[in-house]
Image (spheres, rainbow, N blue to C red):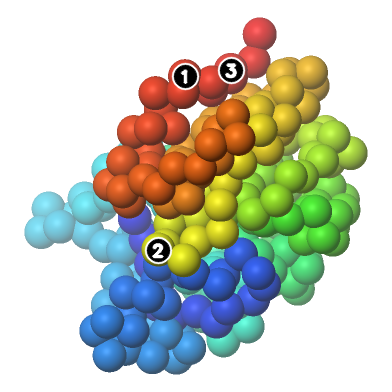
């Protein structure tokens, strides 16, 4: 696994961004998250060592722009170079998430056609309104590998109309002292939808404020992922 952040900074885009950990962390350090700038790691996938070998070893999964959005408008002038590097490193598999899926067709390279085999795109949704808007677009896009990311999940969502050709659905709660609660029933409902359609499902993290069997719990941030794992409800295709 490798991380690649060719730029940093982002802007809140919808309700799911309310307690964004990137904005919170930057605020503590006195950084303006709304300023989007290229990073020193822009060329990381094609960087080589003194022996002329790629520093990113072949076969890795590369998490792209996990502290920003790959489709953000301010990066339009830089993105074509990223696509070139993604093409060059066909031996790596790149994954990026986006809340700006409506921009996808204007952000792809000329040779995209039906998608690159080494790119997975996760469309992020947080409530039914954003699910209906974004996933109706996502379903029609020429992408070979599609994931749906329901994180932070802030209400019950019906994904059933949008599960065709989806390779993975991820669910997670919100992390913040003032976070909106995650109801375990919402998680189980999405899991049921995935199982019925034979779509892989992953419960990635609980929320700081978690509801189970009608009881409210407050969890430590460090325990959110481990508690989700203990639920043991992840589903792989049969």
Q: How crowded is mark 3: few (under 14 residues within 10 Å), some or many (20 or more)?
A: few
In three-dimensional space, the C-alpha distance between marks 2 and 3, rounded to whole angstroms, equals: 32 Å
Residue in the image at 82% along x and 41% along y: 158
Position in image of residue 125 (x %, y %): 69, 55
Residue at far front of view: 215
- Which structural element holds mark 3? loop
Viewer-closest of 89 and 1: 1
Asked whether the residues under the numbered discs 1 and 2 touch, taking CB atoms below 8 Å apart as contact, a structural biologist would say: no
Quarter of the picture holding the C terminus: top right
Select label 1 or label 2 by which is in front. Answer: 2
Q: What element carries label 1?
A: loop
* Residue for badge 1: 232
Of 132 and 106, nearer the camera is 132
Q: Tell me: 236 left or right of 189.
A: left
Disc assigned to residue 236: 3
Query: Quick check: can you spot residue 5?
Result: yes
Q: Residue at x 34, y 33 (%)?
A: 226
Residue 215 x, y percent position in the rendering: 53, 36
Image quadrant assignment for residue 48 = bottom left
For label 2, the SS is loop
Question: Is residue 197 shown left or right of residue 211?
Answer: right
Q: Name the residue under label 2.
A: 177
Crowdedness of circle 1 by 10 Å Cα count: few (<14), some, many (20+)?
few
User: Is residue 2 visible to us here?
Assistant: no
- Against 125, is 41 above or below? below
Quadrant where the N terminus lies? top left
| Closer to us: 49 or 188 | 188
Local packing at callout 2 (Cα closer than 10 Å; few below 14, some 14-19, many 20+) is: some
């Amino acid at each position: 696994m490798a991380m690649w952040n060719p730029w940093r900074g982002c802007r809140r885009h919808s309700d799911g961004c309310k307690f964004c950990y990137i904005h919170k962390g930057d605020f503590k350090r006195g950084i303006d998250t709304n300023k989007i700038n290229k990073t020193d790691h822009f060329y990381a996938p094609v960087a080589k060592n003194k022996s002329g070998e790629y520093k990113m070893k072949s076969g890795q999964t590369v998490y792209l722009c996990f502290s920003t959005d790959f489709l953000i408008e301010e990066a339009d002038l830089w993105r074509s170079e990223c696509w070139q590097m993604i093409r060059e490193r066909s031996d790596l598999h790149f994954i990026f998430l986006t809340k700006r899926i409506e921009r996808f067709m204007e952000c792809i390279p000329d040779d995209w056609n039906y998608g690159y085999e080494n790119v997975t795109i996760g469309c992020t949704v947080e409530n039914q309104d954003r699910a209906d808007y974004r996933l109706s677009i996502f379903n029609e896009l020429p992408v070979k590998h599609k994931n749906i990311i329901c994180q932070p999940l802030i209400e019950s969502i019906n994904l059933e109309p949008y599960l065709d050709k989806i390779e993975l659905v991820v669910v997670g709660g919100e992390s913040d002292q003032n976070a909106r609660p995650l109801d375990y029933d919402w998680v189980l409902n999405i899991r049921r939808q995935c199982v019925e359609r034979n779509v892989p499902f992953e419960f990635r993290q609980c929320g700081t404020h978690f509801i189970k069997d009608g009881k409210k719990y407050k969890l430590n941030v460090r325990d959110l992922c481990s508690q989700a794992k203990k639920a043991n409800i992840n589903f792989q295709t049969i």
